[in-house]
Structure formats: structure tokens, C-alpha cells
Image: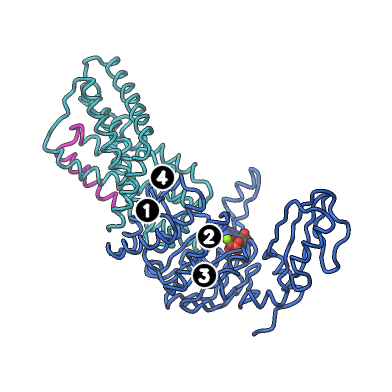
Amino acid sequence: MIEVVALRKDYRIAVHHRGFWGALRNLVETRYNVVRAVDGISFTIEPGEFVGFVGPNGAGKSTTIKILTGVLEPTDGSVTVNGLVPRRDRIEHTRDIGVVFGQRTQLWWDLPVTESYDLLRHIYSVPEAEYRAQRERLCELLEVGPLLDTPVRKLSLGQRMRCELAAALLHAPTMLFLDEPTIGLDVVAKETVRTFLAAENRERGTTVLLATHDLSDVERLCPRMILIDRGALVYDGPLEAIRRRFGAERELRVDFEGAAPAELPDSVEEQERGPERLVLRFRPGEISSAKLIAWLSDRQTIADLEIHEPPIERIVAEIYRRGLPPPE
Amino acid sequence: MRAYLHFARCSFQRRAAYRLANWTGIAVNFFFFLIHAQVLVAFFGTRTLAAGWRPEDAVLYFAGSEALLMVLAGFPDWENNVGARIRSGQVASDLARPVDLFYRDLAERFGNAFYYLLARTTVLYAGALALYGIAPPLRPELLLLPLSLVLAIAVSGAIWYIAFSVSFWTENATGPVSAVIWVHTVLGGVVVPLDFYPDALRWVCDALPFRAALYTPVALLTGKLSGSALAFGLAHQAVWLALLVAGARVIEARGLRRLVVHGG
Ligand SMILES: Nc1ncnc2c1ncn2[C@@H]1O[C@H](COP(=O)(O)OP(=O)(O)O)[C@@H](O)[C@H]1O
Ligand SMILES: [Mg+2]
């Protein structure tokens, strides 16, 4: 179980004076700017939960994950994971968790993937037979078998991320902390990763905390979403409730084979307009995508179109503007 | 323990992945050896150098020092070190695993050293001696060479670890590390053998750790150390290793403290 109570984290950044005299002043006095990255958030996660940890860039997701994984010390508040204090009990704590920092690699860049796996087996002292079985299972699910002999630097991002996930789970941890593992992945790789994570959680009861700023990750995987912004907790509950409250607002981008229609249906909001291009916002509750598309194609031939989920920034703005949904 | 052996192994293999780099490295080491040796032979012919060394003693010595330079990490590993890991943020990934930062680094040094011992030392030493028709001195003291090498590799590992640890406090470690490289090279007593230094400077070198990482094992390999000088050399290595490890631990603890409290 993960318990976070009134967690706060301040980063201290040295402010340097400029120029020659500034450099001398730096020697005798150092001034610091304090950045409050996490500002008093609390939550509890039960074993077996799959929680989406969501927020715009700079919200404090990575900082919180680093505190939970024993990398950083909280400035204030308390964090316990299965009764351990991550920073204080770092070695014991890290034995039982799997971690993927999306921007980093735990694999040896110049070596075939399999060497890193062998190393991890020894880091976590996994018995040979268990290691074999686990590795085989993960390789099959994540389709990394054919990549094992490839040096990590030669892998594509999607291939590497699948290898990273397998690496994080070789010691069969009961908890998995993921910091933006789907960032930059193509659709196919994203889907493999998501299917895999869903299965790990469902079949093995692995607790997953998934930091992301991609709401489609949450929609696909997480019954519960913890939403933070500027270090503070904004919402903790199902994504569905937010959807119901604010309507599932969508964005439609259309390219026409000619001039874009001048007028639009009432319930549709114009975001952007080019000579042959429109970006529109609409709520499927008010007008269905099929109707809207039909309406547009009646007026001009459509060359191409895309429908997008609203980005997390807009949801956060909506919550500030219109308040949270009432609790279920 | 097994885990750290595997860190060493991975580090060994990382070196081995760049075979071309090894051949160019051999060429560079050999080039410097030739310069050293030719200058000596040109200047002294068959006359005795200072400190009772004949020219062939000096040629032998420089064959040993160039052959062992990479094993003993006369220069630090700029790509793989604690400073680079802090700067890139990789250290977060390290700390999220049940691994000790310092021993992991040391294990990597040993992996590198073992690779260079096989891939570079043998080729260079044999080649250099063959070129000048010098037989390597095979004396019973050589049995202590593995011990001295292990101590030296650990000492140099600790020195570079401490040097790169400034990254816990400052963005750019290049300046401080470069300063350490200079001190290390001069006081390590290999470029010019310690034997040729004036007494005062020798005394300084004997008091400081750097000769433990360079001069002692090279002098032992090339038959320049025996008796009480050898006993002193090994004891000096052991004592400095203990001090440096303790020092590295203290610095690391304070650096980590800063890292985990104020940023990272
Ligand atoms: N090492 C650091 N030093 C100073 N400020 C930092 C550091 N890491 C993050 N921050 C700041 O803390 C805030 C939260 O960052 P982060 O936790 O990385 O957010 P997220 O992962 O949600 O994008 C941001 O304002 C960021 O600039
Ligand atoms: Mg982040």
C-alpha cells in the first residue's frame, strides 16, 4: 500500500551573480531560489490498483515518482510504501519495486539487451529458474525475444521501451512506477505497452502508478486518475466522472479539397481556420462526430480528418473554471 | 557481490564492443613509448642515467608504464562516471535500484582495467620489449604484482570517483577533474619515474596517494621495487586505499544528501 500524506517538495536552485564581481560574490554568498514542485498532496493507493497520475508538464509528476521510488527526499510530509520509508529504507524498498523513467534507460547502451537482463537478475538476486520463467514470459508478451541480442543503442524508441518494461519486471516486483513510458511511441508500440500493462495488473495483481500527460493512457488503463497541477492535487477519482461533467469534448481537424465552409453548426466552436483547413471543438453529447462530419462534407469535399481527445491542459482549465464534479 | 561482478563484466564488454578504439589506443600508447625510449637512447646512448638507471632500465620502465597506463586509469573515463550520471539524470535510475553508487563505479573500473590488461598491456609490453630486445625481469617479487595492481586500480577508481563527485555540487566537473589529472600525472611518478625526482618532491609523492595508483605497480612490474621499498609501496597503497574509500564514502554521503534534498 502506498500512503502519501501532505507531501511537499522544494527544489533549491543556486542563483549566480553575473560577471567578474559576481563570480567573486558567488564564492562568499550563495543565494537560492526555491521551486515548490509538490505542494501538499495526499493520496492512498491500495495493492492491485492501476492509477493514472496525470498533470500538465511541470505539474510535479516526476518529482512525486522520484520520492516514491526512494530517489528524492520529501521536504515535508510523509510517504510510506508497504510500511517502508522509500528514502530511508532505499535498498530494501527498491528490491520490491519496478521503475521505468521514460526519458532514461536502465539498459547498457553499448551491450546487447540480454546482458542488462543478466545484470538485473544479479542485482535483484533472482533465482535462476524463476528468472528464466519470468524472462520468457515477458519476452513473449512484450515481443522482445528477437531483440535480445541487439545492442540497446540500435533499438528504436518503441523497441527500447518494451525492453525497459521487461527489465523493470524481471524480478517480479509487486509495484510498478512508470514515468511517461508511452511518450513519443508510435500507435502500435503504445498499444503493445498498454495491453501488456493491463494484463500485468489484471492477472498478477501488480500495483501500477502510471504518470502521463496523455489522457488516452488513462482512458484505456486506469479506473482511477489522480490529477495534479502546479504541485497540488486537483482531482482524485475516475476519469469517467470528469468526462461526464465536462462532456467528452473533442477536437476535429479537417482538411478540405477547396475552401473551408464559412458557417458552422451552432454547437461547434471554431479553434483555427485556414483557407482549406478547420480545427473545431465540439461535444459529442451535442452533436455526434458522424453528424458533424456529414454536415461538413455536404458543403465541401473532405481530404483528410483527425479527431483528438482534449489535451490535459484544457481539462485542468475546465476544472478551475467550472469546478469539480460532485463525488459519486 | 555477484551483482558487482556483473557490473565489472558489463563494463569489460562495453570496452570490448569498441575493438577499433583499442587498436588506435595501442597505437597511441606505443607512440608515446617510442618517443620516451628514443629520446633516452639518443641522449644517453649506453651511459648511466640518474639514480643508477641504465638506458635499458628506462626503456623497460616506459614499456611498463605505457602498457599499464590504461589499466591503472592514468586518465579518467569521461563517459562513464558518477559525474556524467548526475548530469544526465541517470543517477535517478541508479538510485531506484538496490545498488550502491560507489561500489558499482568501482566495479566498472575493474571491468575496464581487466579488459585493458588483456587487450592492451600484453600486446604493448611484449611488443615494446621485443623491439628493443629487452627481456622482462622475472623475479619472485612479481608474485606480488596482482595484489599491487588490484590496490592501484581501486585507488585510482576512488580518486576519480572523488574528483567527479564535484558534480554533486556544481554543473561542470571538467575544471576540477582536469586539475586532478595534472596533479595525478605529476605526483603519480610515471611520466618521469619517481626515482629521478629530487628528494623533497619524492617525499611529497610518498605522502600523497597518487603514486599508489601509478608508480608502485609499474615499478614492481619492471623490477624497480624490492625489499623495504616494495614493502613501503604496498603498505602505502593499502593505507591510501582505506583512506580514499572512507573519504569517497563521506563525500558521496554529503553529495547524495544534497542531491536528494535539494534537487536531482
Ligand atoms: N532538479 C530540479 N531542480 C529544480 N527544479 C526542478 C528540478 N526538477 C524539476 N524541477 C521543477 O519542479 C517542477 C515539477 O517538475 P516535474 O516533477 O518534473 O514535473 P512533471 O514530471 O509533472 O512534468 C517544475 O517546475 C520543474 O521545473
Ligand atoms: Mg516528468
Q: Is residue A223 above or below residue A22?
A: below
Q: From mark 4 to mark 1, how far is it between C-alphas?
A: 10 Å
Which residue is painted at 21% across and 15% down in the image?
Answer: B46
> Mark 3 belongs to which subunit?
A
Disc 4 marks a residue whose amino acid type is Asp
Q: Is B16 or A206 nearer to us in this picture? A: A206
Q: From mark 3 to mark 2, how far is it between C-alphas?
A: 11 Å
Instruction: List the residue tagged with mark 4.
Output: A110
The circle drawn on residue A209 is 3
Disc 3 marks a residue whose amino acid type is Leu
Disc 3 residue crowd, few under 14, some 14–19, many 20+, Cα 10 Å: many
Colour of chain B as rendered = cyan
Q: Is B169 or A277 nearer to us in this picture? A: A277
Instruction: List the residue tagged with mark 2.
Output: A181
SS for callout 1: helix
What residue span does the magenta drawing correspond to? B221-242
User: Mark 1 or mark 2, which has the lower sequence index?
Assistant: 1
Q: Is residue A205 left or right of residue A37?
A: left
User: Mark 4 or mark 3, which has the lower sequence index?
Assistant: 4
Instruction: List the residue tagged with mark 1.
Output: A116
Q: Can you give x and y, in whole percent of width and height, for residue A119 in the image?
A: 34, 55
Residue B129 lies in quadrant: top left
Q: Residue furthest right?
A: A263
> Mark 4 belongs to which subunit?
A
Colour of chain A as rendered = blue
Q: Quadrant of ligand 1?
A: bottom right
> Mark 2 belongs to which subunit?
A
